[in-house]
Image (spheres, rainbow, N blue to C red):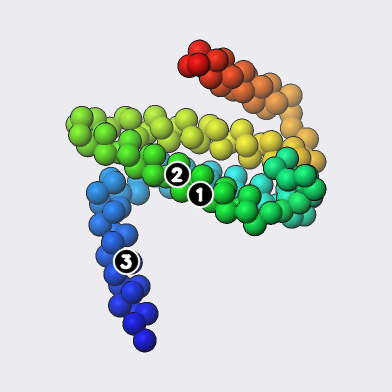
Amino acid sequence: MYAKELYGFIGIVGAALLHIFGGIDLAMLVLIAFLAADYFSGLAVAIWFKKSKKTKTGGASSKIGFQGLIKKAMVILIVSMGSLVDILLGTDYIKNAMIIGFCANEFVSIVENGGMMGLQYPAIVTNAIDILKQKADEEGKHEN
């Protein structure tokens, strides 16, 4: 009965939040595409290939899937906070730097999911992924 009003309210709140957090530009759309591709490729690995590293059986888990969605939402929230920092400082690069970092991370995960599905990659791709992983590991060690 009140569905139209609820949808209207959700639309208004959503539009206001988008405006506050800097809107959706091309970089944000690319990030959303990477997040979605990673989520669905991970889901495919678990459902059809039964090779998920996140469950004992290798299959799908609704709990793990929901946790994945929460993590993806957190990425969007963090990037939105970066946009607010850009607004505060009068800059336009903090959000984009965060997006590039998260996209690189999602890309590595998508490639790994493809590997678990049996895709064979050229050596240059696997070497590039290894280099990205090594750099991420080194940066993680320096932060601790």
Q: In what element is the residue under mark 1?
A: helix
Q: Mark 2 points at which residue?
A: 74
Q: What residue type is labelled 2?
A: Met
As displayed, is residue 2 above or below residue 9? below
Q: What separation in Å lies between label 2 and label 3 (alpha carbons)?
A: 21 Å
As displayed, is residue 25 above or below residue 112? below
| Chain-order first, disc 1 or disc 3 | 3
Q: Which residue is drawn at 26% across and 33% down?
A: 86
Q: Mark 1 points at which residue?
A: 70
Give the percent coordinates (x, y) of residue 46: 73, 50
As displayed, is residue 102 above or below residue 65? above
Q: What separation in Å lies between label 1 and label 2 (alpha carbons)?
A: 6 Å
Q: In this view, does 19 lie to the left or right of 32?
A: left
Of tags 1 and 3, the one toward the viewer is: 1
Which residue is at the front of the view, 98 or 61? 61
Of tags 2 and 3, the one toward the viewer is: 2
| Chain-order first, disc 2 or disc 3 | 3
Q: In what element is the residue under mark 3?
A: helix
Give the percent coordinates (x, y) of residue 34: 53, 43
Q: Name the residue under label 3.
A: 11
Q: What separation in Å lies between label 1 and label 3 (alpha carbons)?
A: 21 Å
Which quarter shows the N terminus? bottom left
Q: Residues within 10 Å of mark 2 (few under 14, many from 20)?
A: few
Q: Residue furthest top?
A: 142
Give the percent coordinates (x, y) of residue 133: 62, 23
Q: In what element is the residue under mark 2?
A: helix
Q: Which amino acid does label 1 sit on?
A: Ile
Give the percent coordinates (x, y) of residue 124: 69, 23
Q: Would you identify the image quadrant in which residue 135 lies?
A: top right
- The answer to whether marks 1 and 2 mark residues whose Cβ atoms lie closer than 8 Å is yes
Q: What residue type is labelled 3?
A: Gly
